[in-house]
Image: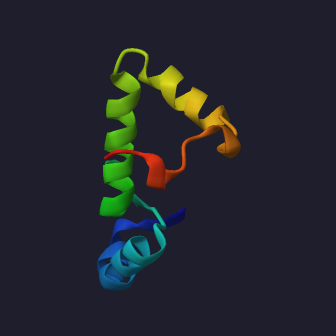
Amino acid sequence: MTTTTITNFRKNVYSMVENTVRFNEPVSITTKDGNAVMISEEEYLGLIETLYLTSLPDMKEKLTDGLNTPLEDTIPEEEVDW
């Protein structure tokens, strides 16, 4: 994570936003009144989705079970009726 002051952020806003978007590099922006973190929209949406999924009853366990299932024990995608 890149850390910068608000003054430096204002001077380099375009390049910092571009790096955040292209490389998912968060930026910590420090000010005298507190700090903020800038993340890409992709990272933000991923965090929101993760929070939502883990808030559903039993979903956390289902996701963990899925992560721990060996690939050879799964159904090939072409056999799934979407």
- Residue 50 at x, y percent in the picture: 40, 38
Q: Which residue lies furthest to the top in this view?
A: 57
Say if 28 sits above or below 17 in the image: above
Q: Position of residue 71 (x, y in %)?
A: 66, 45
Which sits in the foreground, 34 or 75? 75
Question: Which quarter of the figure is the N terminus placed in?
Answer: bottom right
| Residue 19 x, y percent position in the rendering | 43, 78
Q: Nearer the viewer, residue 21 or 17?
A: 21
Residue appearing at x 42%, y 77% in the figure: 22
- Residue 19's place in the image compared with 79, above or below, is below
- Residue 80 pos. (x, y %): 42, 45
The residue at the point 32 percent across, 42 percent down is 48
| 11, above or below 68, in the image | below
Report whether residue 36 is seen.
no
Q: Using residue 57 as the reference point, say whether residue 65 is left or right of it.
A: right
Measuring 38% from the left and 84% from the top, which residue is drawn there? 15
Q: Which residue is drawn at 69% across and 44% down?
A: 72
Whether residue 47 appears in this view of the structure is yes
Quadrant of res 18: bottom left
